[in-house]
């Protein structure tokens, strides 16, 4: 087996008395799609925050393509090829959807060209293609604060994808999306990821979505990984069912 | 040299006392309202001008101390509610930049109010200082007003404020709002009232600083500006919202400034800001402040 | 297209004003230099930041002209030197203040400008204190001009500088880094997660704002031929912010519109109410902000849209 794309070892982080991460070990192989499940407050977002450099783990290591990245600032980590989307979409609310995506495309090259337009023909076309891939072409010219929650979530993901990452971390991509649309959206998203060969980790509360789209699933509970493996096996595990899925009436 | 050092220290203490009273008001208001009142220095100036007028009106020197207290209270009690209810209450939900612009606009207005009411000629009224006479320290005579009264009042203000915030119901309510406004609202705290009370106390402290400063200096247009900038330096160096920290920093900056006055006069205006920049370079949130990470 | 038309109309109007009366030529020159400085304030406002101390850079440009005039006789070189010194100072201060936002950004700028003002007042041997420094009229493009010819030349110089700056700023605002200013205002952390240093974005705008203020200050010094510490005083910074809000931040024309109106009104009003001028500005500022108006540029925009809709 080849070396994992991402390898976290012994990640720990406490907020006062709350252990948001308590010795997390997790590997993600190149090309796989991993789902993270677990109750509210289990430390799923904290894990993403540590991998993307927003929070510095108090102990442990994070290796990406073999390189230690724990403690690097978000800006550096993004440049290495890790992008993320957010549980609460983080959009530039005075910009249009197109501009939000174009700014992320520009972040890769040409950002400091002081007098070249943001919406160059090239960038505009690339952004529109990306948006079309997520069925967002219709809202491309809307201001991003005028979208509904589901669309905001998707735009947030489109922005992360515009960075052309090797690894994409998505924090609850389908929460806030109407139940009827969830599968269609995930189908498109996952198809796009597989097509581009992007490795992905996503936090998810809907077990149907997990079963259908994840290659592997890791179960979080109180800052630890309770179980991990193929969805069919893990979701059938009685401990997981009791500890995680049982209390999962309302997605949080 | 020794004598100069003593003089500088005494000057510094007296100056730090005034500075603290203004700065603590600024930081208290910020802690609760999350608005930095750029016009806070103008309240200092209005307190000072009013004090000078009232001392003049009082006539008898024995009444002059009373006149100072009255000026501070009147300024706080009138300007505080007027500004909080009339202006700030409209902008709590607005963007930071708009809040800043609004208090800046207020500052522009109040600076001219002073000119219109009190003119632009220097005013000087030192009856309270003369009333208290002089005391001897280490071979020099120093005014009791600056040696005892100013630091005394500042110390009382610090103790009273911390006691009020820790031990009284209203004070604890204010602290609760400082820590978590949503939670405070949820448990039924009347945030509107807390804002009003806090701002009035803050305005009163600025005015008290001004009233007490009035007898020691001549009042000219622009004292309010000097004071807002300097007291901002104090609260920024301490960390926004830090009350005890403001006391320590006011001392530090007050002493450093008066040492400069005696030993390196050309540095007088620069020293407080050099201190501030030096501290902020090492500790961006100030000596006693902590940076809080926004959750994503 | 409409933008070009509006700019053209503005230029013609200014030229007419300047033709009409000599004193209006002077006022127009001053208005253009104010507009240049305000253009910089507008860049910062795009990022949601307000500087209460940008008169510092106007003063830097103006004093550079005054200090260098004995050694340099060419107005264009003085202008460039003013811009360069202001930009250098902007880098020094900017590296520090761009670590901060909102309150700190505004107040730290105010603090630095007030320190500079005090120094200009106190270091008499260097700056001649409140008396200020007289500037001997230099030549322009090697031509020794005076009287109306000089006034015209300076007015045209200011006009060219304004057009150039306005054009460059408009393009900058349409570029990724210029567009990212708005992102600093709404969701700065996300910029970091895109791999972009928000601080560097802001610093770039800050440098541009210092340079623009420096050019404005240098032109002011050439027009008034006299510089005083008041150029750095907070009231002057306040006026720049006022004009920025009055003109509106939506379009590069805003600062110049605001500046022309401001300077025309000031000629009369500041003389009539010398002790209430700031107060009037404060009240107008409050009204504009509390009514959420978009300034003169916004008004013009609405007007154009309505006319367009009808026609
Ligand atoms: N910045 C923070 N400061 C304090 N506590 C935090 C912070 N971030 C997360 N926590 C706490 O850490 C725990 C894990 O949170 P989080 O990672 O957001 O959980 P999840 O995403 O699984 O719902 C929670 O108890 C939460 O309150
Ligand atoms: Mg979460």
Image (cartoon, rainbow, N blue to C red):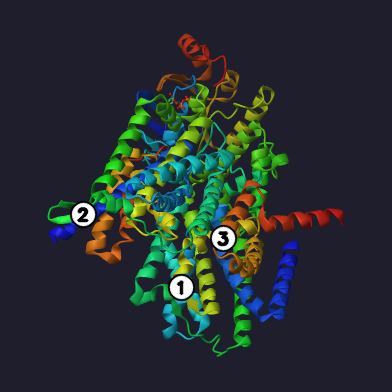
Image-based side of C113 in relation to A184, left or right: left
Q: Give the residue at x 52% y 41%.
A: A165
- In space, the residues marked 1 and 3 are separated at their CA atoms by 21 Å
Observer-nearest residue: B215 or A57?
Answer: B215
Q: Quadrant of residue C169?
A: bottom right
Are labels 3 and 2 assigned to the same chain?
no
Residue that numbered label 2 is attached to: B142
Q: Quadrant of residue B245?
A: top left
Q: Give the residue at x 43% y 80%.
A: C68
Chain containing mark 3:
C
Q: Say whether residue B256 is visible.
A: yes
Residue that numbered label 1 is attached to: C228
Q: Nearer the viewer, mark 1 or mark 2?
A: 2
Q: Mark 1: few, some, or many residues within 10 Å (few <14, many ≥20)?
A: many
Report if the CB atoms under discs 1 and 2 are less than 8 Å apart. Answer: no
Q: Give the residue at x 73% y 70%.
A: C8
- Residue C159 x, y percent position in the rendering: 63, 74
- Residue A228 x, y percent position in the rendering: 45, 20
**Label 2 C-beta lies within 8 Å of the nearest ligand 1 atom:** no
Observer-nearest residue: B292 or B70?
Answer: B70
The numbered disc on residue C276 is 3
């Amino acid at each position: 087996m080849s070396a994992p794309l991402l390898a976290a070892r012994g990640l720990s982080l406490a907020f006062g008395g709350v252990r948001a991460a308590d010795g997390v070990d997790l590997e993600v192989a190149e090309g796989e799609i991993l789902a993270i499940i677990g109750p509210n407050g289990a430390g799923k977002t904290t894990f993403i925050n540590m991998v993307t450099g927003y929070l510095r783990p108090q102990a442990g290591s994070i290796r990406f393509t073999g390189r230690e990245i724990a403690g690097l600032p978000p800006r550096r980590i993004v440049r290495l090829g890790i992008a993320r989307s957010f549980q609460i979409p983080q959009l530039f609310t005075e910009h249009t959807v197109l501009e939000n995506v174009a700014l992320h495309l520009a972040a890769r090259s040409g950002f400091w060209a002081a007098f070249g337009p943001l919406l160059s023909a090239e960038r505009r076309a690339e952004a529109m293609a990306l948006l079309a891939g997520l069925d967002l072409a219709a809202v491309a010219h809307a201001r991003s604060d005028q979208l509904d929650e589901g669309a905001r979530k998707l735009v947030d993901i489109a922005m992360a994808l515009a960075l052309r990452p090797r690894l994409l971390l998505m924090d609850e991509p389908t929460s806030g999306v109407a139940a009827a649309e969830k599968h269609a959206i995930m189908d498109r998203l996952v198809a796009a990821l597989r097509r581009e060969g992007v490795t992905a980790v996503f936090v998810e509360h809907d077990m149907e979505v997990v079963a259908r789209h994840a290659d592997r699933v890791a179960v979080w509970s109180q800052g630890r990984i309770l179980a991990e493996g193929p969805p069919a096996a893990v979701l059938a595990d009685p401990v997981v069912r009791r500890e995680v899925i049982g209390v999962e009436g309302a997605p949080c | 040299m020794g004598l100069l050092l003593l003089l500088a220290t005494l000057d510094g203490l007296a100056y730090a006392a005034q500075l603290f009273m203004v700065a603590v008001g600024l930081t208290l208001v910020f802690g609760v309202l999350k608005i930095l009142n750029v016009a806070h220095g103008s309240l200092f100036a209005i307190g000072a001008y009013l004090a000078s007028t009232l001392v003049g009106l009082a006539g008898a020197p024995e009444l002059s101390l009373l006149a100072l207290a009255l000026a501070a209270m009147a300024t706080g009690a009138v300007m505080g509610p007027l500004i909080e209810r009339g202006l700030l209450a409209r902008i709590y939900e607005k963007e930071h930049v708009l809040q800043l612009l609004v208090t800046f606009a207020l500052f522009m207005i109040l600076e001219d109010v002073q000119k219109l009411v009190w003119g632009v000629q220097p005013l000087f009224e030192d009856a309270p200082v003369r009333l208290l006479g002089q005391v001897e320290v280490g071979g020099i005579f120093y005014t009791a007003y600056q040696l005892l009264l100013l630091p005394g009042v500042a110390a009382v203000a610090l103790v009273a404020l911390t006691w009020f915030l820790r031990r009284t119901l209203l004070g604890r309510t204010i602290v609760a709002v400082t820590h978590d406004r949503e939670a405070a609202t949820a448990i039924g705290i009347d945030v509107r009232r807390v804002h009003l009370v806090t701002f009035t106390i803050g305005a009163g402290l600025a005015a008290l600083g001004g009233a007490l400063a009035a007898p020691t200096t001549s009042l000219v247009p622009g004292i309010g500006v000097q004071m807002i900038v300097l007291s901002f330096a104090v609260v920024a160096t301490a960390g926004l919202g830090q009350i005890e920290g403001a006391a320590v920093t006011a001392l530090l900056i007050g002493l450093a400034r008066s040492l400069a006055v005696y030993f390196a006069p050309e540095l007088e205006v620069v020293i407080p800001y050099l201190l501030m920049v030096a501290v902020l370079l090492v500790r961006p949130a100030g000596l006693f402040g902590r940076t809080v990470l926004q959750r994503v | 297209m409409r933008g070009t038309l509006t700019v053209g109309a503005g230029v013609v109007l200014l030229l007419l004003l300047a033709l009409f009366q000599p004193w209006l030529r002077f006022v127009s020159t001053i208005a253009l230099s104010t507009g240049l400085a305000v253009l910089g304030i507008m860049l910062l406002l795009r990022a949601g930041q307000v500087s209460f101390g940008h008169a510092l850079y106007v003063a830097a440009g103006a004093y550079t002209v005054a200090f260098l005039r004995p050694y340099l006789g060419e107005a264009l070189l003085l202008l460039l030197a003013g811009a360069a010194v202001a930009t250098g100072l902007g880098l020094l201060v900017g590296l520090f203040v761009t670590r901060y936002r909102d309150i700190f950004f505004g107040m730290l700028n105010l603090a630095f400008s007030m320190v500079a003002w005090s120094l200009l007042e106190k270091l008499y041997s260097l700056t001649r204190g409140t008396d200020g420094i007289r500037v001997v009229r230099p030549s322009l493009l090697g031509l020794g001009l005076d009287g109306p010819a000089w006034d015209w030349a300076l007015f045209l110089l200011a006009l060219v500088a304004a057009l150039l700056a306005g054009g460059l700023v408009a393009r900058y605002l349409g570029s990724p880094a210029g567009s990212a200013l708005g992102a600093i205002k709404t969701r700065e952390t996300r910029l970091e997660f895109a791999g972009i240093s928000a601080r560097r974005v802001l610093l770039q705008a800050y440098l541009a704002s210092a340079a623009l203020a420096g050019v404005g200050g240098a032109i002011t010094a050439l027009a008034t031929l006299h510089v005083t510490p008041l150029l750095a005083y907070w009231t002057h910074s306040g006026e720049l912010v006022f004009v920025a809000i009055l003109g509106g931040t939506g379009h590069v024309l805003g600062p110049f519109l605001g500046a022309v109106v401001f300077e025309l009104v000031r000629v009369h009003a500041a003389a009539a109410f010398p002790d209430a001028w700031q107060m009037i500005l404060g009240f107008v500022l409050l009204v504009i902000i509390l009514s959420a108006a978009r300034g003169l540029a916004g008004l013009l925009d609405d007007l154009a849209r309505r006319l367009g809709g009808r026609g």
